[in-house]
């Protein structure tokens, strides 16, 4: 076993990556199932293993705000949250992105109340998809670590300067132990050079009233940065692969080249789907998997032509449908999609369940997994 | 005598209403703070007063932030500056709504954590920027657009709430007393940790007073004792000179009320109730100062 190979939860892997990235300020508030991330960081700071200021704020709204206040001085910052905490930050998520601050956040996906439920669901992060944050969804402890390291480099790239949210499934990944390689990033993440940082010798006003014509260009600039982010993500993931030997793509494909039917999902479901594809292939069904990693910026080169898609949404937009299925249909109008809603509230969805969803798929319909067909 | 620097830290032509108390106070706050200062401003009159991008009013950096967020923003900024060895002053300049109402959670958290910044609340006793709706700091009897018959409950005692955080420095001030403001800001910024100054800022359109009477109205508040100037440095509580003088023979509160259109619906019973509250508070303040002196 390599010296660097560790057993760790997803939470601790994110904390370890943050330690490697050496932020100057971390501001955070506890919430299950994220708390282990910030406890681990608080412990690093307390023991002197990490040279950072840890601000134990009184709310998530203040966590994000303190990150904004620190970031604008030109230092690297980090926070972590989940579920209701993310929603409580909502106003400041828009502020962070609008102010073009490269804040990095660990986000553990958890169901929203009522009723109280701490298990995995993607509704929390998907309800923040229009805030201007980059969003990546990970599926293993190693990927959580690697994506966190890359998040700092991508966010701080002056072609991007937008905040990045690393999403991982509550408990299914945040609390699962897996072996991972705690790679030393070396100079992979260059020093932060924030062009708009506060300088008392060159005083500027930030966020003052902006008339429509100027405000409009600010927002257009954000979309330009999102477009640039596609390039920066590709470059960063390529450099990461070259340096450290692990490669990632915005959409991870598994057995897709000759597939007739493809399961599309995010996070741990997208990983579990690979086992379902193996099972289906043994039955003679040419199945594959597309695991959507980067939701923002949304991938524009999914190879959906000539395939049927079974899109599993661990989320729901009431009065519309599953978010991922809707986004794929919007970007790829010809896509043939069977829409499945599954895993809400931490509902268990096994690879066998996914294989059955593929076998019984009906293109053009929506199916709520677990609700009897006759009731839908 | 207090020597106040001649150099102006505010540029000309702010977009204030005529006779704005908050800008008058800010003029002296910035003279005291100097150039190595960042202002943090949540949603309030001063978000508008500073003008429209790309122009600005201040000669120090200004960071605008969301309504509830000023103290948390200043916390992050101060921690970041200190982490890299900078002693830059971080000063929040917030209205009473952003302080006593929507921003009080972030403020309480920051004060409890002992963050190193100065929080200044300019109190015009209502939501001025949105056109004068009542806030928790609106006094009993005052008409606002959401208390058309006059407020029926008391002004929130913000200073006692802040005092419960045991700050190294806390003070009240009034826009009508610039030297007092200057000295208090100077002292506050010389002390590490969280500092709080609560400034009464007369607001001519909101208080329904002539714009040239701002200074006079503020002085009437102090002379009647409805607003008391004091400071507390650690445990040392001192009544400031203008209030010490006023408390020897306070002017009747009714004169202060009658000078302002916002109190026009105050009846005799309410006026008596306000006077009784003022009398009681002045006794409390005097007792606190005496106790502090005895136990120095």
Image: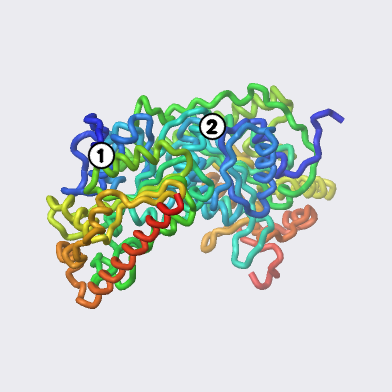
Mark 2 residue crowding within 10 angstroms, few (<14) / some (14–19) / many (20+): some
Alpha carbons under labels 2 and 1: distance apart: 29 Å
Determine the image quadrant of residue A221.
Answer: top left
**SS at circle 1:** helix
Determine the image quadrant of residue A367.
Answer: bottom right
Residue occupying image coordinates x 69% and y 23%: A242
**How far from the left and from the top, in percent, is residue A294?**
60, 40
Residue occupying image coordinates x 14% and y 52%: B211
Towards the viewer: A196 or A330: A196
Q: For the residues tagged 2 and 1, is the chain the same? A: yes
**SS at circle 2:** helix
Towards the viewer: A301 or B210: B210
* Subunit of label 2: B
Residue occupying image coordinates x 71% and y 26%: A184
Judging by the rendered image, the residue that carries numbered circle 1 is B27
Mark 1 residue crowding within 10 angstroms, few (<14) / some (14–19) / many (20+): some
Q: Earlier in the sequence, mark 2 or mark 1?
A: 1
Above-or-below relation of A307 to B228 = above
Towards the viewer: A28 or A285: A28
Marker disc for residue A13: none
Is residue B120 in view?
yes
Is residue A94 in view?
no
Q: Residue furthest bottom?
A: B269
**How far from the left and from the top, in percent, is residue A219?**
39, 40
Residue occupying image coordinates x 51% and y 34%: B80
Judging by the rendered image, the residue that carries numbered circle 2 is B83
**How far from the left and from the top, in percent, is residue A218?**
37, 37
Above-or-below relation of A43 to A345 = above
Determine the image quadrant of residue A230.
Answer: top right
């Amino acid at each position: 076993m390599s010296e660097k190979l560790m057993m760790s939860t997803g939470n601790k892997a994110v904390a370890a990556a943050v330690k490697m990235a050496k932020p100057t300020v971390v501001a955070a508030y506890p919430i299950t199932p994220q708390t282990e991330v910030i406890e681990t960081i608080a412990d690093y700071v307390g023991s002197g293993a990490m040279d950072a200021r840890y601000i134990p704020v009184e709310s998530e709204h203040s966590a994000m705000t303190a990150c904004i206040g620190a970031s604008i001085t030109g230092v690297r910052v980090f926070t972590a949250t989940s579920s209701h905490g993310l929603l409580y930050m909502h106003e400041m998520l828009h502020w962070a992105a609008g102010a073009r601050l490269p804040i990095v956040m660990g986000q553990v996906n958890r169901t929203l109340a009522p009723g109280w439920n701490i298990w995995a669901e993607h509704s929390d992060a998907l309800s923040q998809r229009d805030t201007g944050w980059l969003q990546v969804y990970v599926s293993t402890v190693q990927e959580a670590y690697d994506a966190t390291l890359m998040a700092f480099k991508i966010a701080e790239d002056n072609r991007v300067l937008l905040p990045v949210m690393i999403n991982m499934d509550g408990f299914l990944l945040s609390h699962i132990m897996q072996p991972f390689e705690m790679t030393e990033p070396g100079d992979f993440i260059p020093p932060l050079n924030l062009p708009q940082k506060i300088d008392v010798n060159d005083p500027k006003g930030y966020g003052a009233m902006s008339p429509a014509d100027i405000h409009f260009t600010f927002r257009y600039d954000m979309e330009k940065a999102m477009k640039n982010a596609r390039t920066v993500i590709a470059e960063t993931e390529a450099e990461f692969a070259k340096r450290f030997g692990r490669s990632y793509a915005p959409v991870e494909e598994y057995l897709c080249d000759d597939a007739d039917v493809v399961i599309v999902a995010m996070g741990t479901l997208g990983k579990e789907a690979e086992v379902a594809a193996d099972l289906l292939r043994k039955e003679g069904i040419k199945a594959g998997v597309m695991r959507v990693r980067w939701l923002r910026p949304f991938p524009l080169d999914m190879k959906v032509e000539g395939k049927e898609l079974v899109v599993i949404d661990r989320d729901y937009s009431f009065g519309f449908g599953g978010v991922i299925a809707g986004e794929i249909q919007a970007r790829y109008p010809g896509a043939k999609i069977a829409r499945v809603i599954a895993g809400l509230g931490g509902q268990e969805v096994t690879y066998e369940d996914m294989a059955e969803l593929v076998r019984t798929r009906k293109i053009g319909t929506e199916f709520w997994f677990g609700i009897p067909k006759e009731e839908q | 005598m207090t020597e106040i620097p001649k150099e102006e830290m505010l540029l000309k032509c702010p977009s204030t209403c005529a006779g704005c108390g908050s800008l008058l106070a800010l003029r002296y706050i910035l003279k005291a703070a100097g150039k190595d200062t960042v202002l943090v401003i949540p949603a309030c009159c001063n978000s508008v007063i500073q003008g429209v991008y790309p122009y600005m009013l201040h000669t120090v950096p200004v960071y605008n932030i969301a309504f509830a967020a000023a103290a948390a923003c200043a916390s992050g900024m101060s921690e970041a500056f200190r982490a890299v060895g900078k002693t830059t002053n971080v000063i929040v300049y917030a209205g009473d709504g952003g302080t006593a109402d929507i921003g009080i959670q972030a403020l309480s958290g920051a004060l409890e954590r002992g963050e190193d910044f100065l929080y200044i609340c300019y109190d015009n006793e209502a939501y001025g920027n949105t056109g004068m709706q009542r806030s928790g700091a609106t006094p009993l009897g005052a008409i606002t657009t959401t208390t058309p018959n006059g407020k029926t409950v008391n002004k929130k005692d913000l200073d006692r709430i802040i005092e419960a955080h045991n700050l190294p420095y806390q003070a009240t001030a009034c826009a009508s007393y610039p030297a007092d403001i200057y000295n208090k800001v100077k002292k506050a910024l010389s002390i590490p940790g969280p500092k709080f100054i609560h400034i009464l800022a007369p607001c001519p359109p909101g208080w329904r007073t002539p714009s040239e009477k701002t200074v006079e109205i503020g002085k009437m508040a102090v002379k009647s004792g409805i607003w008391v100037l004091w400071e507390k440095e650690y445990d040392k509580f001192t009544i400031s000179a203008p209030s010490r003088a006023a408390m020897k023979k306070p002017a009747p509160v009714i004169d202060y009320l009658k000078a302002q259109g916002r109190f026009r619906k105050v009846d005799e019973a309410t006026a008596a109730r306000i006077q009784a509250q003022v009398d009681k508070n002045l006794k409390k303040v005097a007792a606190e100062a005496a106790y502090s002196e005895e136990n120095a």
